Amino acid sequence: MKTQICKIDPEVIDEDILRSAGEIIQAGGLVAFPTETVYGLGGDALNPDASRKIYAAKGRPSDNPLIVHIADLSHLTPLVKGDIPEKAKLLADHFWPGPLTMIFEKTKLVPDETSGGLPTVAVRMPSHPAAAAFITAAGGYIAAPSANLSGRPSPTEAAHVIEDLDGRVEMILDGGRVDIGLESTIVDFTEEIPIILRPGFISLEMLKEVLGEVRVDPGILSEAEEKHIRPRAPGMRYRHYAPKAPLTIVEGPEEQVIRRINALVLQYQQEGKKTGVMVSGENISRYHADVVKNMGSRSEDVTIAQSLFSALREFDSEGIDVIFSESFDTPRMGQAIMNRLLKAAGHQVIQA
Ligand code: TXA
Ligand code: MG
């Protein structure tokens, strides 16, 4: 398949491009598109064949459900069985359009292929103007996982999508670099007390402020791996984001972390290995690895979230043999960042 790559200006989207993207979706094809979180791999959410194609293009197991993206609040009701919970309406008021996904009991309108065989459906209304315009042009319901090959870091720019999906989708809409860089926060509303299944830009604190009581899936906490607690969201159970080189997170007091990482780097360099480190901007000049990635400032941790996935991808193309990372347990985005970083590291953590 020849993939059409179309540059778009998110603020003024070319009508012809939008129309042909919409036509591809309505004919059952696939279009990758930018959102405010990461790029999505879109197909018609109401067409089971389109969902099957999404799984095939990503190499994703078909029991891992897709998020249905909408651009208009009135499109939520037909997807949800029974009444929409009051607390979900409240969250929609506060955070939609935006980086929040909510899970409900599904109606028959949602094919089992889209929901990965589950009786529930995940719904998100993205705020990216190109995403909204594309969803509308395509008929209102777009099933979209992140637009990466299964297991790889989610794409934060079109070049990442091209790397993974060129020749596997009909069209890629290139809207430049995304804003947030980590996938949406997922909140499950199928129980009395809402529960976070995946941390993201919308933090536990922000959710508590609106809802009062909120729980966190014990399966996504850092100790879950050791305790063998399975995450509830199927996608959170898979190995994910891992670069080719082994990645180790080094935790502890700052000075000790710097010393320990530099010692490890030196040891591997003496073995002829090419080393890479992921560190905060504050400490960048203090590391002696072959490749030192400036992840951004700890005081502005949104920049760390933005650089995480592209840094992990870059190590692969730079031929790095071994990677060490500082821990980024920052106050604002720390939960979301560490959730991805720990997965990328296969939970390999050492104490300095
Ligand atoms: O920010 C995002 O959410 C991006 C952009 C493209 O919108 N999408 C995204 O999709 O991250 P994906 O497929 O890579 O991740 C969706 C996650 C998976 O872990 C999946 O298992 C979970 O959501 N999920 C989807 N439907 C679910 C359901 N009904 N119950 C539990 N988990 C569900
Ligand atoms: Mg994904």
Image (spheres, helix red, strand yellow):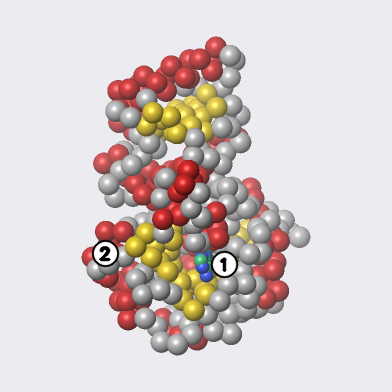
Give the residue pinned by disc 2.
208
Furthest residue in direction front, as rendered:
227
Dividing the image into 4 quarters, which one contains the N terminus?
bottom right
For mark 1, give the secondary structure. Answer: loop
Rendered image quadrant of residue 108: bottom right
Q: Position of residue 109 (x, y in %)?
A: 58, 84
For mark 2, give the secondary structure. Answer: helix
The residue under label 2 is which amino acid type?
Lys
The residue under label 1 is which amino acid type?
Leu
Rendered image quadrant of residue 29: bottom right
Instruction: Identify the residue at image location x=58%, y=57%.
Output: 147
Q: Are marks 2 and 1 in contact (CB under 8 Å)?
A: no
Measure the C-alpha gap from mark 2 to mark 1: 26 Å
Instruction: Identify the residue at image location x=44%, y=53%.
Output: 220
- Disc 1 beta carbon < 8 A from ligand 1? yes
Give the residue pinned by disc 1.
66
